[in-house]
């Protein structure tokens, strides 16, 4: 009998002991949590277009100068395409920044009136590549042919569809990934692949015209140049695909570092403001050898018409006007002259240095009236 009387007491003591230990552990954990920093303190998540796009490397190089191992960290995230990246930026709790093409935003504004975007800075321009099989000699030959334009909703898909529409070319568009499409092109199963990326694009590494594959020129008519920037692909960009004296005319679209709609007093806002301060201050180091050559095209102070600049970025630029001005390619005139020379090369004309200087001064005057 006594055996059964003592068992409840032992059980009670055991339960009390367990409860006390559990309470002590909870208090200890609570005390520790109060002194630890939040796990996402100082973290900024930056979404890129895709693994084969240069935006991945750009994001990694930004992280290299911003991360300090303690208070700041940039976490690059590979996205599922330009349209999805924009949705992620607008809706996902963790995505603070995204690298977006400007024509993608134009497309989204048409689809979703009222769409607005805040940006930190314009980054670089990405060139439109159109790689074709041997029997395709011009863009016009693609009418009725299959052209791969990457996955639906990607930056390439949006740009390519728009370009073909502007050129009035009714091609059949397919949506394989770049690597799959490249293999299909080599087998002759499709006529061409379109790809938007900053040159030189890693996708074309090791490709030469020994197999008959070649890059097509994009006709630079009024409709095309009103929507996109003229650009060229040269032998320096693709030694195996482009002849030294025969650059390929194409177009380029701008890439912008966009930011989510953040509450000014929130932790995420402070994280991004801190990111801006460090990124802008350390920008000059990205111009050093070893970094992607596209950084040399970046002008931190360049405006993006129709977009609103993130307040912390705008304030930094106003405080550091001299530094921002120096971040413009100090070879802007050289870039302008190269542009003129490329256009003249296509047209077969010449221009004296005095004429170039005069035209450049007119250009700078026009540029000052656009702000």
Image (cartoon, rainbow, N blue to C red):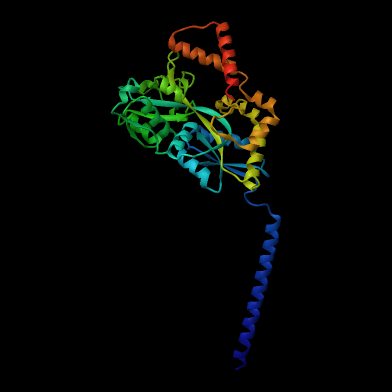
Above or below, comparing residue 90 to residue 139 in the picture:
below
Lateral position of residue 149 relative to residue 319, left or right: left
Q: Residue furthest left?
A: 144
- Residue 79 seen by the camera: no
Instruction: Give the answer, above or below, for where 40 lies relative to 348.
Output: below
- The location of residue 263, given as percent across then percent down, is 61, 46
- Residue for point 69% across, 68% down: 24
Viewer-proximal residue, 318 or 283? 318
The outermost residue toward the bottom is: 1
Q: Is residue 24 left or right of residue 86?
A: right
User: Could you tell me which residue is drawn at 42 percent across and 34 percent down?
Assistant: 158
Give the percent coordinates (x, y) of residue 244: 45, 14
**Quadrant hosting residue 221:** top left
Classify residue 303 as left or right of residue 235.
right
Residue 39 in percent (x, y) is at 63, 51
Task: Give coordinates of residue 46: x percent, y percent.
Answer: 56, 40
User: Where does the C terminus fall, quadrant-wise?
Assistant: top right
């Amino acid at each position: 009998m006594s055996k059964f009387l003592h068992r409840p007491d032992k059980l009670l003591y055991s339960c009390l002991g367990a409860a006390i230990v559990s309470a002590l552990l909870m208090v200890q954990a609570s005390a520790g949590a109060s002194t630890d920093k939040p796990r996402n303190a100082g973290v900024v998540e930056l979404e890129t277009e895709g693994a084969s796009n240069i935006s991945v490397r750009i994001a990694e190089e930004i992280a290299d100068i911003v991360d300090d191992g303690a208070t700041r960290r940039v976490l690059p995230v590979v996205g599922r395409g330009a349209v999805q990246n924009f949705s992620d930026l607008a809706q996902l709790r963790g995505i603070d920044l995204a690298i977006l093409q400007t024509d993608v935003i134009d497309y989204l504004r048409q689809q979703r009136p009222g769409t607005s975007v805040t940006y930190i800075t314009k980054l670089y321009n990405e060139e439109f590549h159109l790689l074709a099989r041997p029997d395709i000699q011009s863009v016009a030959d693609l009418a009725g042919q299959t052209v791969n334009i990457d996955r639906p909703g990607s930056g390439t898909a949006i740009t390519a569809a728009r370009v073909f529409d502007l050129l009035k070319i009714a091609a059949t568009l397919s949506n394989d990934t770049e690597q799959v499409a490249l293999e299909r092109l080599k087998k002759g199963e499709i006529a061409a692949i379109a790809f938007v990326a900053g040159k030189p694009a890693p996708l074309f590494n090791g490709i030469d015209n020994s197999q008959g594959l070649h890059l097509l020129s994009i006709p630079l008519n009024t409709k095309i140049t009103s929507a996109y920037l003229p650009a060229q692909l040269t032998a320096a960009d693709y030694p195996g695909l482009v002849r030294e004296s025969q650059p390929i005319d194409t177009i380029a679209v701008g890439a912008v570092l966009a930011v989510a709609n953040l509450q000014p007093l929130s932790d995420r806002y402070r994280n991004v403001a801190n990111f801006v301060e460090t990124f802008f201050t350390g920008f000059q180091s990205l111009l050093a050898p070893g970094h992607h050559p596209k950084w040399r095209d970046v002008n931190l102070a360049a405006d993006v018409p129709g977009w609103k600049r993130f307040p912390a970025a705008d304030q930094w630029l106003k405080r550091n006007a001299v530094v921002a001005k120096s971040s413009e390619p100090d070879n802007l005139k050289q870039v302008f002259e190269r542009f003129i020379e490329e256009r003249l090369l296509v047209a077969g004309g010449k221009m004296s240095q005095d004429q170039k200087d005069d035209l450049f001064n007119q250009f700078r005057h026009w540029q000052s009236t656009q702000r």
